Image (cartoon, helix red, strand yellow):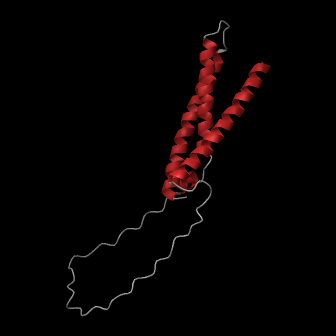
Amino acid sequence: MAYVLVMGGLALSVSFTLGWALWRLGRAALGWLGGGPATGKSKVKPRARKPAARKPAASKAATPRKTTARQPAKAPREPWGLTHWLAARHSLLPLASLAVMLYALGRIVVFGLQHRPVEAPASFAQVVEVVGWTAAVLLGLALVSLLARWRCRA
């Protein structure tokens, strides 16, 4: 039992460290590719445009007006509160990547236990399956969170 606890703690710490490193590397890669700043908000402020000087019209008769009426452009709708809440959840992707790595490690352990002469506990495979479904749900939530962040431009 002590072996399982020690090796489980080691596997958890290695998986967490790898997940964190992959998360930081991914954010840095997005910053390098121009997808956004790697750390924090951009410090470059956009320049303000100067309004163009208007030339006075020669006469109203010289410029014919179109008879077709233009419809005003619709303003974009405000995102829902759930979308704002999901956009604020920045920790879903690292948590999902950690769960996926734990699931992959668990599948390797199950594979190794099946090929041993000693019988492995049957409940361990069920635990790995639950971790796999949890990882799938977390990945889905992380993708929805990324879409919500894109929608809110947060």
Q: Position of residue 74 (x, y in %)?
A: 37, 68
- The percent position of residue 87, horizontal first and vertical second, equals 56, 53
Quadrant assignment for the C terminus:
bottom right
Q: Tell me: 116 left or right of 72.
A: right
Q: Quadrant of residue 51?
A: bottom left
- State whether residue 92 appears in this view: no
Q: Residue at x 20, y 79 (%)?
A: 67
The residue sitting at 45% across, 81% down in the picture is: 50
56 in relation to 145, above or below: below
Residue in the image at 77% along x and 24% along y:
6
Q: Where 148 sits versus 60, above or below?
A: above
Q: Classify residue 16 by image quadrant.
A: top right
Nearer-the-camera pick, 74 or 44: 44
Nearer to us in this view, 7 or 24: 24
Of all residues, the one furthest to the top in this rendering is 117
- Residue 94 occupies which quadrant of the picture? top right
Q: Nearer the viewer, residue 19 or 72?
A: 19
Q: How many numbered marks appear?
A: 0
Q: Quadrant of the N terminus?
A: top right
Q: Residue furthest right?
A: 2
Q: Residue at x 36, y 87 (%)?
A: 54
Q: Is residue 83 left or right of residue 3?
A: left
Residue 77 spot, x, y in % from top left: 44, 63
Q: Is residue 65 above or below residue 134?
A: below
